[in-house]
Image: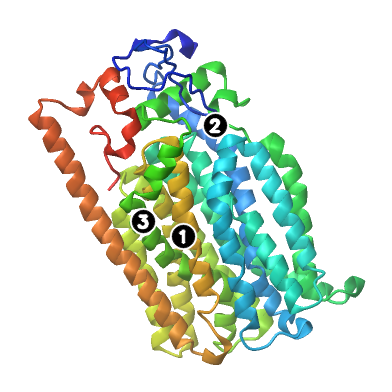
């Protein structure tokens, strides 16, 4: 059925007078002085089995390709760790902290790109914008394979960060255009699990490509960059046609299915404002809850990048050869992939995030304690499994938690970019976490990561307790008025549509 036929009156004149139809969003259309809404969706009409089939159809058409994009992105930014074991430093004349600097310069440019990129993605289209940034970082990756000195490597890493910066926050926001709040976590977990696959696949791939040493007069590490960059560019050319911009234009959905998806989202988002306006950007910037999540995130992303950049080095310093260390870095990532997807599924099912965040923080802390407290290789290696399995699930878990609790599309897009952007500053810290001078035990590096994860645990506990209390407070205020959430009419919701997550009918994910 056509959603234009489903209308309801709206008793407010405080809403903008112009039409604010946006891609992928439910629109409300207002006259200059009229309080009527020209377009309003009825609730979802599919039964549970049919809804399940619809979600599976969306999953197969959306999630796999997005996961491939992130696998390529994470592979391209972290393969320098594998290239290091293929004599990158020797060939470029690097010494001292040069390698750590090469890692760190990537992240300021990565962070700087995130908020502008999310705004551009909203103002253009996901298919076009993701295609553009993919071609950009694929070119940067390929050109990194022909650098001749340390300066050239730094410039290539800076450019790579600028091009890659928009992918993770952009795709995270894109997923919220399709799925309800408590359906996003699993999809984000599957999407981010590509990072663990990149860690596993990257070690195997680098081990094989490094054997091309001398081909075309280029060293083995150069071919790691060149081949992986070329493959990214090839995939980018298909992105424009494989990515559906929003439910309203999705070719893989029938007209009835499109209407159902939009109706489900509208019911879940509580009719909050979805149009672009600068005031929603300001709401995100001045929301203290987003800033707490940003601190939680930097405590997670610092060990995330430390592991992804240095795991082969950590394993090598347990007493193994370069080739063996490359291969031994694979199994921890496989376990991390299972933990990431399992954690996302469990959190979505329970409709909780904070408790799971804290659990995985504790798992990671135990892993790093095993690494720092002994020089027994077997115990240390088991510690890498726990560290990876504790850190990786908390990346999509954290961004889903924050995204669930931001009301309104524009505020959510900016808030997610702030969240991911600030967290990625942890990459600058991680670049110096494991210094050659601290090998083979890396006490300062392991100690730093224990501290950052402990901070994230404490702030997650604070945030969880606050959200539980706030939800109860809103329930009590509503009960005092003799109302329940089901009693709120479309007119009552429309009157608060610009208040975002501070609307009285909005409830936080704890």
Residue 252 position by quadrant? top right
Give residue 132's position: percent from left, percent from top: 70, 45
Where does label 1 land, which residue? Answer: 422
Q: Which of marks 3 and 1 is nearer the N terminus?
A: 3
Q: Which of marks 2 and 1 is nearer the N terminus?
A: 2
Q: Residues within 10 Å of mark 3 (few under 14, many from 20)?
A: some
Check residue 291 in the rendering and tell me which mark sits there, or answer none: 3
Where does label 2 land, which residue? Answer: 57
Find the distance from the CA under tag 3 to the CA under tag 2: 36 Å
Q: Residues within 10 Å of mark 1 (few under 14, many from 20)?
A: many
Front one among 219 and 299? 299
Q: What element carries label 1?
A: helix
Residue 195 position by quadrant? bottom right
Front one among 115 and 26? 115
Residue, far right = 216
Residue shown at 65% from the left, 86% from the top: 321
Looking at the image, residue 486 sits to the left or right of residue 183; the answer is left
Find the distance from the CA under tag 2 to the CA under tag 1: 34 Å
Colouring mode (rainbow / by chain / secondary structure / one colour): rainbow
Looking at the image, residue 53 sits to the left or right of residue 312; the answer is left
Eyeballing the image, is 131 above or below 314? above
User: Is residue 359 visible in this depiction of the protein?
Assistant: yes
Eyeballing the image, is 281 above or below 387? above
Looking at the image, residue 70 sits to the left or right of residue 265; the answer is right
Find the distance from the CA under tag 3 to the CA under tag 1: 9 Å
Q: What element carries label 2?
A: helix
Residue shown at 40% from the left, 16% from the top: 40
Q: Earlier in the sequence, mark 3 or mark 2?
A: 2
Eyeballing the image, is 436 above or below 81? below
Looking at the image, residue 398 sits to the left or right of residue 197; the answer is left
């Amino acid at each position: 059925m056509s959603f234009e036929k489903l209308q309801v009156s709206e008793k407010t004149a405080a809403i903008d007078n112009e039409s604010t139809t946006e891609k992928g969003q439910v629109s409300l259309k207002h006259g200059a002085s009229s309080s009527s809404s020209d377009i309003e969706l009825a609730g979802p009409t599919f039964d549970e089995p049919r809804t399940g089939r619809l979600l599976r159809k969306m999953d197969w058409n959306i999630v796999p390709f997005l996961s491939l994009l992130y696998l390529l992105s994470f592979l391209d930014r972290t393969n320098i760790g594998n290239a290091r074991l293929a004599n990158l430093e020797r060939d470029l004349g690097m010494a001292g902290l040069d390698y750590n600097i090469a890692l760190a310069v990537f992240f300021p440019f990565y962070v700087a790109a995130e908020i502008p990129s999310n705004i551009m993605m909203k103002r253009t289209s996901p298919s076009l914008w993701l295609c553009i940034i993919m071609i950009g970082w694929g070119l940067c990756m390929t050109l990194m394979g022909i650098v001749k000195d340390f300066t050239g490597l730094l410039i290539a890493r800076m450019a790579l960060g600028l091009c890659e910066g928009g992918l993770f926050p952009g795709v995270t926001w894109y997923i919220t255009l399709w799925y309800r709040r408590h359906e996003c976590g699993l999809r984000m977990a599957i999407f981010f699990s590509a990072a663990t696959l990149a860690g596993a696949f990257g070690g195997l791939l680098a081990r094989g490509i490094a054997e091309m040493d001398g081909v075309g007069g280029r060293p083995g590490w150069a071919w790691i960059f060149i081949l992986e960059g070329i493959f990214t560019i090839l995939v980018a050319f298909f992105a424009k046609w494989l990515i559906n911009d929003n439910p309203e234009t999705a070719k893989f959905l029938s007209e009835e299915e499109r209407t159902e998806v939009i109706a489900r989202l509208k019911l879940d988002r509580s009719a909050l404002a979805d149009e672009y306006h600068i005031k929603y950007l300001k709401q995100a910037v001045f929301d203290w809850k987003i800033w707490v999540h940003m601190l939680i995130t930097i405590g997670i992303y610092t060990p995330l990048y430390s592991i992804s950049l240095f795991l082969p080095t950590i394993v090598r310093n347990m007493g193994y050869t370069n080739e063996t260390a490359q291969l031994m870095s694979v199994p921890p990532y496989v376990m991390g992939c299972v933990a990431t997807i399992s954690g996302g599924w469990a959190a979505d099912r329970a409709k909780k995030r904070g408790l799971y965040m804290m659990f995985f923080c504790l798992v990671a802390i135990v892993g790093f304690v095993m690494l720092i407290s002994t020089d027994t290789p077997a115990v240390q290696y088991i510690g890498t499994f726990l560290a990876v399995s504790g850190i990786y699930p908390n990346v999509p878990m954290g961004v889903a938690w924050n995204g669930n609790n931001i009301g309104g599309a524009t505020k959510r897009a900016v808030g997610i970019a702030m969240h991911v952007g600030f967290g990625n500053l942890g990459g600058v810290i991680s670049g110096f976490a494991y210094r050659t001078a601290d090998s083979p035990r890396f006490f300062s590096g392991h100690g730093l990561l224990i501290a950052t994860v402990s901070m994230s645990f404490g702030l997650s506990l604070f945030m969880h307790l606050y959200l539980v209390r706030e939800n109860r407070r809103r329930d009590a205020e509503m009960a005092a008025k003799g109302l329940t959430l089901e009693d709120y009419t479309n007119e009552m919701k429309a009157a608060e549509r610009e208040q975002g997550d501070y609307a009285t009918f909005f409830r936080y994910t704890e």
